[in-house]
Structure formats: structure tokens, C-alpha cells
Image (tube, rainbow, N blue to C red):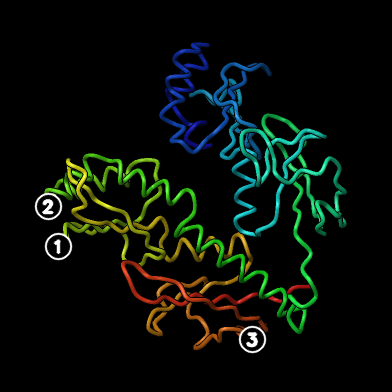
Amino acid sequence: MQRLASSPALLAAVESHNQPAARAALRPLLRNQLVRVRVEVGGRSFLDYGSVAAVAPVTAPLRNAAGRTIGTVLASEQGAVEYAATIHTITAAQVLVRAGSRTLGGSGASGGSVRLAPARLPNNGEIFYRGARYAVYSFPGAGFPALKLRTFVLARVPPASACAVTAAETAADTVGAAAERIYRDEQAGRTTRTVVRDFERSRPFQEAVASDNRDATEAAIVSFFKSTLHVVRVRATFGNRLVADLGGPHVLAPIGGKVRDAQGRLVGHFLLSVQDDLGYVILAQRFTGAQAFLRQSGRQVAAYTSPGPPSIPDRGPVLYNGIRYQAYSFPAEAFPSGALRVSLLIPPVP
């Protein structure tokens, strides 16, 4: 929002009521990160961008050089469908985003249809749908530009045998499984696979690697780093020869792709990652509330707090900084190869 509200070009266009200039100023500010934008002047729409049903709009004033408010800008970073898909990725629950009786998006959304969409849902409680039992949790939210939304999360009620011995252990297993899903999505989720396809379709990158040209390969990789794609490290090989390896030192969840020459022959491979170790630690804490510790060969390479506990079991209680946590650990993969151990400390859950 700050880059929109402080853009001299956008502010000048709004102040002069020049709509084409405002639209031209807005385009480079989007960076494929904003899905809906509205500029309002005098309480009326002056400029609109995007048409998807978006969630969580943020508003900021537009002030000219003299500090006078000349309008407002509203923006959303995520559509209802993508928002529901994010929650589904983390929780494995079905998700519906509704405005009144109208469904704007859902985790089964495709072409406007939602696979799991009961006509009526309680705000909280349980339902039986298509022969299965679901626990329902919902919460209010805001849609673009001023819609009242409610997000419904429908989780299959597991059999009692799926629960651990204690409530704390059950909560740890649930949170830990969510953290594992975040990791798997970083390594092989839809967005990551899209990045791989973009590298495989990039003629500058493919031709540079196929010609064993290090400078050209690095230039192609840097152009991807500067683009809207989120990629943190790329390693390319021609045959068995390393051509280039650019990116951060502590990276996880590599995924591979192919390099072909102009005739379509397989001549090399590449590895890439869309997340580094610290980024995953931040995501895990943000979405699960757990503290994550990443260790390789017993050495801590990233952590929510440092130093971490001297040892963390696969499962079980851990006393750390005077708080009794539950541990959940799982194996992961470092870049370009090697075992990485992810350990979570899950705080007490009421």
C-alpha cells in the first residue's frame, strides 16, 4: 500500500483528474501482487483495477505534496479462491468464502463451482454432508470493496482412534501435520510447479544452459529473481557439469526441472527452490503458532529463536525457556541435497 500511496506519478494523475495517466502510473506498482485496486476521489470511484472477488482490502489516504488528502486507495492482495486454497493447503479442511448466501470462492472452486458447498451452514457446530461428518468453524471478514464476508472451515471429524493419548499430543499432531503440508506445498505445490514450467519454457535460460554459458545462464536466473516469480535459488547443470548456482546459502525443498536444446533433446537439468530456511520458519510460526528449528547434521541452520533447545525429540514434551511444549519433528530436504530435520515446538493449547 505504501508504494501506491506515495507514488508521485499516481498522486499527480489523481490530483489533475487524469484517469489515463493514473492507470499508467498504477500498472508498474501492482507487481502481480495486487488483484484489486480502487482509487476514490470525493467518495466516488475514480479508477478500478481487477475484477476477481477479493478479500481483506486495505485503505490508505492519498495526500499531495502539501499534505492535503486528495483521495483514497483501496487494495487487496488475494482473491477469495486463492485465499480458500491457502487455508485448505495448510489445514486440509474444505473452505468456503461467502457473502450472504453467495459463494465467492472455495477450496474446491473451479470455473465458478465449488465441490463441497452445502446450501446452509451453521456458523459453528457440526453437519452431515454427503455421508460424512464435518465440524464447522466460521469467522467474519471483509471483501472488496466493502462486502461483509464469512469464511467457513469444514473439517472432517476423525474417528476416536485417530487421536493421540492426550489432548496436548493430539493438538501437536494436528499443528505438526499443518507445518508438513506447508513444506510440501513449498516443494511441489501449484505455484512451485508453475515456476518450474516457466524455467522450462524460458528460451534464454534453456539456451544458456544448453550452450554451457555461465554468464548467460546467470543473467537469465537473475532476470527471474527480479521478476514477480518467487524463487530463491537455482542450480543448473549441462550434462554432469555445473553451469551456474545462484541464490541464498540456506535453502530448502528443492524441485527439479529439465533443460533441452533447440532440437528438444534433453541436455541438462536444474534445481530450484521457492523458499529459504528462514522464510519457512516465519511461515510455520505465522500459520501454526509453532516455533520451528531447522537442523542439518545436528547443526542449527535456522530457528524462530536462538539458541534453540539442545535436542528436540520426534515427538514428546520439551521444557524450553520455562514453558512446556510438545515436539513434532519431520524430515525435509536441503538444497541441493542432504537431509534436513524440521522440529516444531507447539505451545500449550487450551
Badge 3 element: strand
Is the C-beta separation of discs 1 and 2 under 8 Å? yes
Picture quadrant of residue 74: top right
Residue under the image location 32 percent in, 47 percent down: 225
Q: Position of residue 274 (x, y in %)?
A: 40, 55
Query: Along the horizontal axis of the image, is 177 left or right of 270?
Result: right
- Name the residue carrying label 1: 241
Q: Is residue 60 above or below residue 216?
A: above
Residue under the image location 14 percent in, 52 percent down: 214
Q: Position of residue 281 (x, y in %)?
A: 50, 66
Q: Which mark is residue 316?
A: 3
Q: Nearer the viewer, residue 278 or 234?
A: 234
Amino acid found under the numbered disc labelled 1: Arg
Crowd around label 3: few <14 · some 14–19 · many ≥20 (10 Å): some
Disc 2 or 3, which lies upstream in sequence?
2
Is the C-beta separation of discs 2 and 3 under 8 Å? no
Q: Nearer the viewer, residue 320 or 63?
A: 320
- Name the residue carrying label 2: 212
Badge 2 element: loop
